[in-house]
Amino acid sequence: MPIRAAQASDLPQIVEIYNASIPGRMATADAEPVTVAAREPWFREFDPLTRPLWISVAPTGEIQGWLSLRSFYGRPAYRKTVEVGVYTAPAAQHRGIASALLAHALSSAPASGICTVLAFVFAHNVPSLRLFENAGFVRWGHLPGVAELDGIERDLDILGRRLA
Ligand SMILES: CC(C)(COP(=O)(O)OP(=O)(O)OC[C@H]1O[C@@H](n2cnc3c(N)ncnc32)[C@H](O)[C@@H]1OP(=O)(O)O)[C@@H](O)C(=O)NCCC(=O)NCCS
């Protein structure tokens, strides 16, 4: 499946996929859908060479999933470390889209000067934990009860992988 860097015109579909994950209460701390306009500053922070936003595109041209690498902590000392986020459209899940995006991102990250990739994943998000563990990520941290979703306290795992 073709993977390419996202363009501004892809943002509505990217937001749609993100919003589709909110009701599941597994992926994001957002509780309400976000708007395309609200995500425009977020989108502008990406740079294909250093902080890419990758998308997987179906033969029909539809975006099936996306993966972001964002700066961690925003301080110069952490410039070689990124935080990954990955979302697959509900209709395209469980078909290897996220795995392919992650493999692509990890293989191209060293050329962007990235040495460490972190993933912040709710401990009850089994698909996401499997995705990252399959790609060689290891649990580096566990933050008990730091989130509350629908009145239920949730734990957050920090997964990490060092790149060669
Ligand atoms: C997590 C997510 C990105 C996985 O995307 P995907 O394209 O379906 O993933 P893949 O098809 O590449 O599968 C990756 C692993 O997850 C497992 N998986 C996928 N969907 C699953 C499900 N519904 N239940 C259990 N495991 C599941 C797959 O089996 C695979 O593991 P395996 O090879 O050991 O079987 C997708 O479920 C999603 O978008 N979820 C909502 C957003 C989210 O949680 N993002 C992660 C936060 S950063």
Image: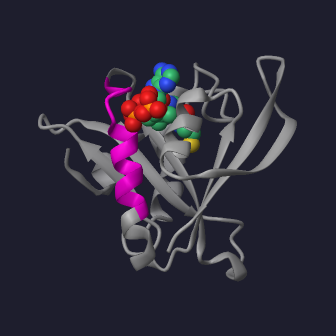
Residue 104 counted in the magenta span: yes
Q: Relative to residue 47, is residue 97 depicted above or below?
A: above
Q: Nearer the viewer, residue 95 or 135?
A: 135
Residue at 76 percent across and 39 percent down: it is 156
- Residue 148 falls in image quadrant: top right
Percent x, y for residue 129?
A: 59, 37
Q: Relative to residue 52, is residue 26 depicted above or below?
A: above
Residue at 53 percent across and 53 percent down: it is 136
Q: Range of the magenta residues?
A: 92-106
**Image mark count:** 0
Residue at 77 percent across and 17 percent down: it is 150
The answer to whether any part of residue 16 appears in the image is: no
Q: Main secondary structure of the magenta part?
A: helix
Side (left or right) of 71 relative to 57 = right
- Residue 130 falls in image quadrant: top right
Percent x, y for residue 18?
A: 48, 35
Q: How is the image coloured?
A: one colour
Image quadrant containing the N terminus: top left
